[in-house]
Image (spheres, rainbow, N blue to C red):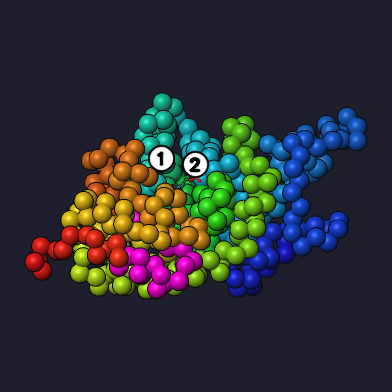
Amino acid sequence: MTSSPKMRPETKVVHAGPEPDPLHGGVSVPIYQSSTFSFQNTDEGAARFAGRDPGYMYTRLGNPTTHALEQCVAELEEGYGGLATASGMAAVSTVFLSLLSAGDHVVGTDAVYGPTRGLAEKHLTRFGIESTFVPTEDIAAVRRAIRPNTKMIYVESPANPTIKITDIAACGHLARDCGALLVVDNTFSSPILQKPLRLGADVVLHSMTKYLNGHSDVVAGIIVSSNREAHTRIEGVLRSLGGTMDPHQAWLVLRGIRTLSLRVNRAMATAEKLATWLDAHPKVEWVSYPGLASHPQHDLAKAQMAGPGAMISFGVTGGFEGAKTMIDSVELMVLAVSLGGIETLIEHPASMTHASLPREERMEAGIRDDLIRVSVGCEAFEDLRDDLEQALAKVAIPATSR
Ligand code: LCS
């Protein structure tokens, strides 16, 4: 391990993980682009498969480059161990299928990434797993949803795309009281801004497609468990399901992580200014950003996170039509789903990332038709503000000032 718990976050992201290349002294981890690993003889092969020899066997079962990434993120999340997956959804599905069995029930955040909820409601039901999605920012609602067979509380905070914040420590207490595990999707914060395991979660997962990789060029996920038992259970299922990571993919994500602190802090500083600017604009009806005092969980965000992040959602005059005009008018921001990259992305969740949810469910979860989601990137604040300004100029004038 080349990072230490004493290190500040910006130092830790640069050094976390194993010694990159003890053999030749390379400062970057080599890419072990090999699907399989040879044995000296049958005894050695047998010893590796029996776990008596720690060497590698076959890349689905483990690979040095992927392992370096897993160790790096496990250190950043302060967990027992990490398991890299082919995508964020591979992390979500592997966690569900590892920790839940037929007859179990999961309580989840209502405004989660659309396919996460779709997986639970459309597919896990075929395996006898039930789910209830509630506004987890309301702890009483979580408590009310718990049943005798609840085995998991699944929280996304900040939530995609409402940017609502859930009290992770309070959910940890509820989970322990009812004998369930707390799983947190930490994609929107990254370990720079939030440490769910420290707050009482048992398992934390990420779509590393977002902030951890940070360059909109890789799809990837990871699962970090707080303890050996959960890690071993999930690892067994992951290796069988097969949603593991390729070594080249792992190398790219590891490269991205080295600038995580720089990117997140830069984007967040710009997001804070943009959210304040949007909030004061006459054509902006509402803004959801945890850094604004008007955010319902502003104080909780301050206590639970090292900063409010770089995701903003907002609505403009004219509702859905206004949102469409606004989104279609931006010139610098890119109209695309995904988030957490160096370029600012804008999208319309009701018709894109969360279109798979029935409208009634979306409305209940606060994913309104007028909601515009922006993932603030690393461009200059002034250029992004000017882009929003010219796009807002095309939106209809508010009725009140006509
Ligand atoms: N968890 C969260 C919070 C996400 O935002 C996403 C993807 C996933 C899990 C799944 O990760 P993936 O398999 O895509 O790596 N979120 C997306 C979004 O908001 N727009 O496009 C993808």
Q: Secondary structure at mark 1?
A: helix
Q: Secondary structure at mark 2?
A: helix
Residue found 42% across the figure and 31% down from its top:
124
According to the picture, the residue beneath numbered tag 2 turns out to be: 89
Do callouts 1 and 2 mark residues in contact (Cβ within 8 Å)?
yes
According to the picture, the residue beneath numbered tag 1 turns out to be: 115
Q: Is residue 402 left or right of residue 117?
A: left
| Category of crowding for the residue at label 1, using alpha-carbon neighbours closer than 10 angstroms: few (below 14), some (14–19), many (at least 20) | some
Span colored in magenta: 373-389
Residue 207 is marked as none
Q: Is residue 371 left or right of residue 75?
A: left
Please state, as top left, top right, bottom left or bottom right, where the C terminus lies in the image: bottom left
Q: Is mark 1 within 8 Å of ligand 1?
A: yes
Looking at numbered disc 1 in the image, what kind of residue is underneath it?
Pro
| Category of crowding for the residue at label 2, using alpha-carbon neighbours closer than 10 angstroms: few (below 14), some (14–19), many (at least 20) | many
Q: Is residue 295 left or right of residue 2?
A: left
